[in-house]
Image: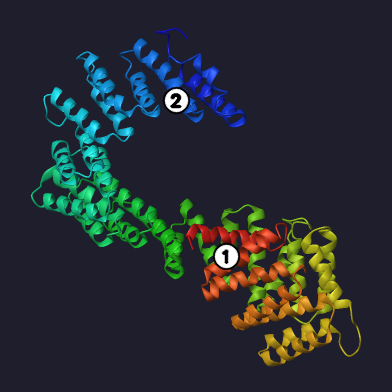
Amino acid sequence: MSAGAARLDDRRFNELRQLSRTIADQAGPERPIPILLQHQDDPRVLGLLLEYYGKAERQLEFLEIAAEQAARQPLDLAVQGVYLKALHAAGMADSVMPVASRIIGSAPDTLSEVWRVVGSQLAELGMHAAALEVFNRGRAAAAGGSAFAREIALELADLGLLNEAVEELLAMVRGNPAESTHPRQVAYRITSRGRQAEDMLLERLDDALKSAGGEVEKSLRSLLMELCLSAGLEKEAYGYFSSLLRKLDDRAARRIAQLFIGRAARLSLFDSALSGYALADSLKLVNHQTALLGQAEILLRLGRYQQAEHHFIELIGFESTPIAAMAWRKLGDIYLNRMDRPGEALACYRKLEELGGLEKEQLLDAKLRIAESFIRLERLDDAGALCRELLDSSEYDPLESSGAMLLLGDVLFFGGQPDSAAEAYLTFAKLNLGDQLANDAMGKIYLIRHDRSPEGGPSRKVGEALYAARNGNVQLARDLFAGLLREQSDSLYRAQVYYQMGRMYERESEFSLALGTYGQLIDELPGHQLAPLAELRMGIILLEEVADTTRARGHLERVVVEYPLGVATPQARRLLRTLDDEKL
């Protein structure tokens, strides 16, 4: 590329940059250099060469290239900027300022941008005192005033001259109160110096607010509101926010309300976000449905499910809007996964079915989870009715609805009908050959049919124990389970007994006993197919009942790592994602 040739267009440059990165990743930083040298007249390519020569530890070689380009293109400030970086990278920091002065001195008077470019390059190299000198010279050349105010304020902050930086900031606000971006940048640079600097800035801005009026007052209130949110000073932030809203026209007030609510939510200041929604709603700055939905989502994140429930119920009242269908779905999810109310969840999903708000696969999955919840709550009649409804539905083929057959087997088994349960398990296993759940089903069949002696085999005793627990005779159930463990050495039986005991203790809210029982299963039979399910149950108990998220995470991670294809793994992954989302 000859001197003075046209630069690469953006598409060609992006392709060249991507190609060079690919080559460097595969063959090392020196390999893309010959390709890039063909286009070194383009300052963007020159910047890439600076990067790769640096990684190859050939900084002095690149300095010669950069010096040549700087001489050939003396008026191209981007090229001059790369030259300054090359000097610094080559260990010639003492030469940077003299060269910078020469660049400024040789620029024509019409090239006023030279002060900003050179000063910014010096700042980027960490030469803040030199950068401040350049910016001040640029201001003087521009006949003073507010020229280079942002740049000067930033350098003052970086040099620790915080009072002077605040003075520049206030001058910026007073000179152009409609401009908020630059004052915000300066303010955050000051607060980055530490808590003492942050407190000083807030105090100075608040003092300035007392004597301000008009647009300057509004600008200062907006800045104080944002800074207080970032500092976690929720009460003060809300005070500035509420007073500011009443001083703005509707359009500006809506923008500020969105800013306050959005920033509060991003900073996890959820109470402030809720208050912001409430105030904006009362002043009719946001649509009432939007406010309800935003508040409901925040309440969900806070775990305040009953309050979220009330908001979603109110949203359901707006029947003609798309929000209503979403509210039904959210409400169903709360009832099913958060409040242990599968009956209400089923009613929500039936409404969604009427509205066409879910795909049939999503609806099936929801109903299967509801059936599981019914079983866990010992509502076997409700679970059985729902399973039979799914099996009789023409919406699904036998394979799609086979999960209902597996659950129906559990309903029958827990209800004291082991023979009928075995038939249901067998039907499921035939439809899902090779699946882990099919193997589990065959294991249950083996348990049921292993011993048919008149005295009652192990499967009958398990059913008897479950029936006793269901009818409130937990001590009898414990005795029956303990007897089975003494009598049986078969690992399949022992695992089933441990697992069913653990589930019984869960239903009775004996969570420490449940944890101990599941732990025995894992310790005694670590390779058994029920071991990951036991790990999962321990994780759920520790998470939901004991509130020990650290131990819960350990069990859930073991499920995912040690049993990546296991039946318990999808739910463990979902719970881990929830923990990550909530940063627990």
Tell me the residue at 57%/68% (across/down): 552
Nearer the observer: mark 2 or 1; the answer is 2
The colouring scheme, among rainbow, by chain, secondary structure or one colour, is rainbow
- Identify the element where label 2 is drawn: helix
Q: Is residue 29 above or below residue 309?
A: above
Quarter where residue 506 is shown: bottom right
User: Which x, y percent locates residue 93?
Assistant: 32, 29
- Specify whether 34 is left or right of 142: right
Q: Amino acid at mark 1?
A: Arg
In the image as oriented, which residue stretches furthest toward the left? Answer: 211
| Frontmost residue, 63 versus 523 | 63
Q: Is residue 450 above or below residue 152?
A: below
User: Which x, y percent locates residue 302?
Assistant: 43, 65
Mark 1 packing: few (<14 Cα in 10 Å), some, or many (20+)? many
Quarter where residue 298 is shown: bottom left
Q: Which mark is residue 26?
A: none
- Identify the element where label 1 is drawn: helix
Q: To which residue does mark 2 refer?
A: 59
- Specify whether 31 is left or right of 106: right
User: Which x, y percent locates residue 255?
Assistant: 29, 45
Q: Is residue 96 above or below residue 264?
A: above
User: Which x, y percent locates residue 519?
Assistant: 67, 76
Q: Which mark is residue 553?
A: 1
Quarter where residue 529 is shown: bottom right
Q: Amino acid at mark 2?
A: Gln
- Specify whether 410 is left or right of 185: right
Tell me the residue at 51%/55% (across/down): 325
